[in-house]
Image (cartoon, rainbow, N blue to C red):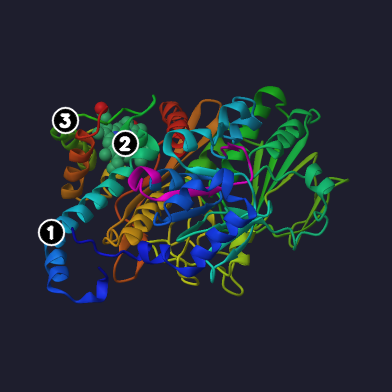
Amino acid sequence: MTTVHTPAEEHAMDPTRRNFLHTLAATGLAAGFWPRALRAASRATVVVVGGGFAGATAAKYLRVWAPEIEVVLIEPNREWISCPLSNRVLAGSLSLRDLKRDYGRLAERHGVKLVHATVTQVDPARREVRTDQGERIAYDRLIVAPGVDFVYDDIAGLQTEPARERVPHAWKAGPQTLLLRKRIADLPPGGVVAIHIPKAPFRCPPGPYERASMIASYLTTRNPKGKVLVFDANPDIQSKKALFSHVWGTRYPGMVEYVPNADLKAVDATRGVMKFDLQGEVRADCLNVIPPQRAGGIAYQAGLVAANERWCRVGFLTYESVAARGIHVIGDSVAAAPGMPKSGHMANQQAKVCAGAVAALISGTPVNDDPIIANTCYSFVGAREVIHVASVHRYDRAQKTMLPVKGAGGVSSEVSTEEALFAVAWGFNLMNDVFS
Amino acid sequence: MTRNSGSTAWVLAALVAWGPALAQSDQHKVRQWAASCAACHGTEGRSEGGMPPIAGRKADELYTLMLAFKSGERPATVMHQHAKGYSDGELRQISEYFSRVKP
C-alpha cells in the first residue's frame, strides 16, 4: 500500500526530537510517563499549555477527532473553577463547589496526558517546552492557552498581595471570589461597594455589569440601604447596555450608580479609597478592582505578543500565531477579531476550530476554510432573572478574519426568568463540553 | 516511499486519494459547525438537562425546527439569533449530522 508522508511523520524523524527522546531515556524521566512515546515515536504529539475553557476543550476535541494524536495538557491546578456563573456565588445563590471540575475525566475518558506543572519556557527552535518541575516535553505542534494576566502597574497602591486581598479582583474564580463575597456579607448597614472596570478589552465584557446587578440583588434583601458604585474606565457600558440600564433603573433605583470615563490611578487599600483622574477620591466600604489585562505570561516568553501590544495575533482558520510557526494560540490571549468577546464560550469555540485545524495539518488533509462559531453570554441580573447577548461569527475570506454575521445574534427581548433556566443549563453543558 | 520520489505510483495514489479527501474535508467542516451548538446543547448534542437534546433526532425534524427559528415562525429566546448565522444548506447538513449521532 502506498502511503503519503505527512508533515507529522517528517517531524517524527526530526533529529532534535529523537535527541529529546534519548535525553529523556537517559534521565529516567521517560520511565513513568513516556513509554508510549518511546515505543511509537511516529505518533505526533500536541502539547497544550493551560487547561481553561480554551486549552481543555482543545485537548478533548483533539483526542475525539484525531485519536492517533498524542495530547499532553500542562496545567498547574488539579481542579478548575468556572468564572461563568461565579457572580452568583457573590450573592450566595450558588456555591463555588458547584463550579468546580477536575481534570480526571479528560485523562480517563479521552486519554489526554495530564502534567500538573507550570510551563516556564517555550523553545520553538527545539520544539519543546520546559516546566517548573524540570521536565522537557517535545511537541509537533503547540497550543498556548494561558488566559489573561492582570496588570497592576498603573494602579498605585495595589502592588502587594495583602493590598490585593483587601481589594480583591475576583476576576479569576476561586479564593478571590470568596474574599469578595465575605466583604459584601460583612458590609455595614447602608455600606457602599465600589467596582472598578478596566478599559476594554477585558475578559467577559458583560461580567462587571452582571456583578453590579448581583450585588444589588443581594443588598436589596439583606442591606437595603447599601449602594453599588460602578466606576468604568470606558465611556459606556460595554455589553447589553440597554438591558443593564433598564435593570438598574427599574429594579435597583438609587442603589446602583454608574460612572463612565473613570480612570483609576491609585488605591488606598487600608482606608478604602480609590483615586480617579477626573472623579477625584472616592471612599467605599468594599472595593473591587478588576485590573487591566493582557495575554498570559508564557505568551510573552514565547514571543507571541508583538511589541507594544497585549494580545497574540493569529490566523483565524488555524489559530496559528503570526509570530511563530507550529504554535497556536486560543482563548482570551488571542487578539480578538472584530466583535469577538473574550469569553469562556468563545474560547470553547475557538478551541474546536483550532483542534480541527491542528489535526488536519498533522495528517496533511485540508484545513476547514469556512469555520462558523457562536457565542452567548448569559448574565444574571436578579436572583432568578437573566439576560443574554448572542453572536455568530464566520470567516471572511476578503478580510481574512472572523466577522459577526449581520442579522444574526442579538440580545434578550426582555429580562426573564425563563432564561435563568437556560443560563444554568448553558453553564453546565458548557462545562461538560469542556471536561467530560 | 517519499513524497519527492516522483513515481507514477505516487501520482496515481494521490489521484485516488483526492476524491475521498474532499469528502472527508466536507465532513470535517460539518463536524466543526455542529460542534458550535455543543456549548449549549452538550457534546454531540447530548444535553444533560435544561436545553433540549438534539442528538439522534430525525434530520427532517431538526431541519424544520431550524428553519422555523430562522424565519421567526417558532418563538424562541435565543435560537432565532443563532439559526440566522447559518445558510439553509448548512442547517440541513448540521441536522443530518445530529441525526446520525447516538442519543
1 or 2: tag closer to the N-terminus: 1
Residue named by callout 2: B44
Which three-letter amino acid code belongs to the residue tagged 3? Lys
Q: Which residues are magenta?
A: A63-82
**Residue B21 placement, left or right of A101:** left
Residue A428 versus residue A307 in the image, above or below: above
Q: Which mark is residue B58?
A: 3
Q: Mark 1 packing: few (<14 Cα in 10 Å), some, or many (20+)? A: few
Disc 2 crowd, CA 10 A, few/some/many (<14, 14-19, 20+):
many
Q: Which residue is mark 1?
A: B19
How far is mark 1 from mark 3, CA to CA? 28 Å
- Circle 3 Cα neighbour tier, 10 Å, few/some/many (<14 / 14–19 / ≥20): some
Between tags 1 and 2, which lies in front?
1
Which chain does the numbered disc 1 sit on?
Answer: B
Q: Residue at x 66, y 37 (%)?
A: A174
Q: Secondary structure at mark 3?
A: loop
Q: Chain of mark 3?
A: B
Is residue A93 or residue A343 the one in the foreground?
A343
Q: Locate residue A121: give its quadrant.
A: bottom right
Looking at this view, is B2 or A373 the one in front? B2
Marks 1 and 3: which is nearer the front? Answer: 1
